[in-house]
Amino acid sequence: MDYELDTTLTVNSVLVKRRVAARVHLIDFLREELGLTGSHIACEHGVCGACTVRVDGKIIRGCLMLAVQANGCNVDTIEGLSDSREIADLQRAFHEHNALQCGFCTPGMLMAAQDLVRRHPQATREEIRVHMSGNYCRCTGYQSIVDAVEEVLISRRGAKK
Amino acid sequence: MKAPAFAYAKPTSLEHALALLERHGDGAKLLAGGQSLIPTLNMRLSAPELLVDITGVSGLAGIKITGTVVRIGALTTHAEIECSPEIARHVPLLAQAVPHIAHAAIRNRGTLGGSIALADPAAEYPACAVALDATFVIAGKHGERRVKAREFFKALYETELRPGEVIVAAEFPAAGASERSAFLELARRHGDYAIVGLAAHARLTAGKLSDARFAFLGAGGTPVLAKNTAATVEGKLSTPDVVAVAQAALGSDIDPPADLYTSSTTKLHLARVLLARALVALAS
């Protein structure tokens, strides 16, 4: 029986090959094996959203996916999205609206927000709240986060015209 | 917390998956989307020797319509069901239910088959399957068998699934032009487990309801089909008087268990509120 498996995946456009224990979930792998500590780990049972990353273009809970399950997948973390400037406007809006205080939830918030902005450019304020409901913030009271996401939705819509 | 050590296998055929289950017996657990299993591993509520990841098995995903039957493969994700025009058109109850399942990041991985096999009493699909009289297709080493959803859910987390078996698909009857459905749920936070929820379906002819099914979730150890309640609305218009009679009858159908935050009495009250809303929605 295989307790460790050869695993090959692409993380932020870089090909990574490692031998990974089956019990290790994706976030521990990214943080401890690859040193990508932007994705945070908190509840470890899928409730808080701090570990949200993108696998093959879709957001997922990094604590609810085994690293070996990401074999052959494309993984994008907050470091990748930040370096590529894909979310530069979201980061600026979060800063300007004070949509973070301690910052612990912010990487997951930005991953979830970018998913909404990308897939539902027409989203309403209520739809922003529903979509972001999977991410906990214990500082802001959410209002400023919704404001920031709404501003980026409106500005990206304007930029397309 | 961190999961205990376990071995991992990813078979590419159903035969191989079934053989692994047979060889390892109780020590093996099936892994599909993992959105319920991995939390239990992380919390060390479960310690299997081997995870059999079936997401590489071909033929277990996708939506296919044959005549009046909509077959949904067990590995079809909540997100795929949510975005499917076929489901919106032919099984609207499921399309209405999916947005209530957890959050986008979880819907991208969680599967229909996983939810059915787990049989959480507060889950959405089991109640929909009971309301719509769906059939589950189950594979084992002796071949395939079919089990009606209404017979599948036996008690809290207890189902008709036998050791070594795998759910391969669920078959839903396609909704006819005169059929209406409504899915309603109350939760403390959007996407959390339901305090109580209702999967409702009925035929509507000249404003009158018939063949109504009200399957409640979070109201017992399994989805509960409120048959006495359904009988009170048969052939009736959805008037305030009819709604009041149905709400009164609901007390004879369900006796919801209290949870950490909500008493049994409150849950019954909330179930009656959802029933009234559903009766209005079905008739409009």
Image (cartoon, grey):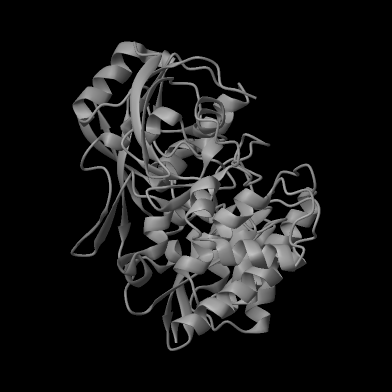
**Residue B251 location, x and y as percent?**
70, 57
* Residue A122, above or below B144: below
Q: Is residue B194 left or right of residue B107?
A: right
- Tell me if A112 is positioned left or right of A75 in this view: right
Please say if B18 is above or below B125. Answer: above
Q: Quadrant of residue B28?
A: top left
- Relative side of B179 to B255, left or right: left
Q: Position of residue A92 (x, y in %)?
A: 65, 65
Q: Residue at x 79, y 53 (%)?
A: A101
Q: Is residue B40 visible?
A: yes
Q: Position of residue B26 (x, y in %)?
A: 42, 15
**Residue in the foreground of this view, choosing between A151 and B129:** A151
Dividing the picture into quadrants, the one containing residue B185 is bottom right
B53 or A63, nearer to the observer: A63
Quick check: B40 left or right of B91?
Answer: right
The residue under the point 30% across, 26% down is B10
Task: Kindly tell me whether residue B185 is visible in this rendering.
Answer: no
Q: Is residue B208 above or below residue A48?
A: below
Count of numbered labels shown in the rendering: 0
Q: In the rendered view, would you say A112 is above or below B42?
A: below
- The answer to which of A90 and B81 lies nearer the viewer is A90
User: Where is the N terminus of chain B found, in terms of image quarters?
Assistant: top right
